[in-house]
Amino acid sequence: MILAFNGSPPFIDSDLFMSESSAIDLTEAISSRVKTEREARNWSLSELAERSGVSKAMISKVERGEASPTATVLGRLSGAFGLTLSTLLALAEQTGERLARHAGQPVWQDPETGYTRRRISPPTGGVLELLEIELPVGVRVPYPPDAFVFQHQQIWVTKGVLTFREGQQVYRLAEGDCLQLGAPAECEFFNGGDAVCCYVVGLVRR
């Protein structure tokens, strides 16, 4: 079972010990990180809303932990901060631990689409980051160009078929295919197949 927000508990001998409180911890960490990034720039809620295209009311709910932000909302907020979505979530998840056991890898689920993102890499803030994505049938996840400015990225499909749009270029990636992204552009991930699409994203900060 995948929780909507699955945090990283302290190391425990049993990998099966994963309480619901860990899910809440990651929700709170994301809320806190968004507020921290906004305040570090001395931006008001209104200014962040204008820069990101996310409503002031939604940002306020996210910061108070009253709303679970979608991947699109987090993508817009991270772009306004000059961060990638992955970096924003990594900052929220960071613990300094060098070993990431499967049972303890944080999993974030988009409450709107069911899209799930598993952070495979240890949350040390290192240069290389590996993510595992599960994209349900029929789901589209768009990202603005700002979300790709500070990273080199490759996409490796491990199951199903992924339709990936990078600017005006469209790629149909089948199982085993690996694509290196080009210059930052508006992108969209789409699963037009009849089964869940799984892919691994490799990120290296520029």
Image (tube, grey):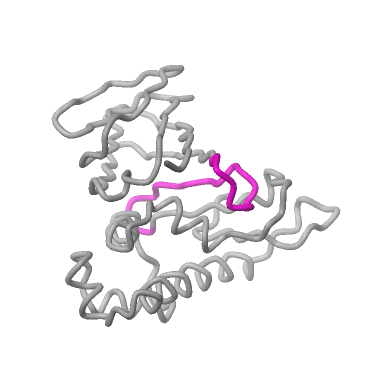
Q: Nearer the viewer, residue 79 or 104?
A: 79
Residue pictured at 33% horizontal, 30% vertical: 181
- Most common SS among magenta residues: loop
Q: Nearer the viewer, residue 93 or 21?
A: 93
Residue pictured at 31% horizontal, 45% vertical: 149
Q: Position of residue 7 (x, y in %)?
A: 61, 61
Q: Position of residue 60 (x, y in %)?
A: 32, 80
Q: Position of residue 206 (x, y in %)?
A: 42, 41
Give the image quarter of residue 152.
top left
Question: In this image, 98 relative to 59: left or right?
Answer: right
Residue pictured at 75% horizontal, 58% vertical: 17
Question: In this image, 76 relative to 134: left or right?
Answer: left
Q: Residue 33 lies in magenta, yes or no?
A: no
Q: Nearer the viewer, residue 117 or 32?
A: 32
Q: Which residues are magenta?
A: 111-129
Q: Residue furthest front?
A: 206
Q: Is residue 103 above or below residue 136?
A: below
- Count numbered badges in the picture: 0
Q: Residue furthest right?
A: 13
Q: Residue 114 lies in magenta, yes or no?
A: yes
Q: Is residue 69 above or below residue 57?
A: above
Q: Position of residue 96 (x, y in %)?
A: 68, 57
Give the image quarter of residue 163.
top left
Give the image quarter of residue 156.
top left
Residue pictured at 44% horizontal, 50% vertical: 86
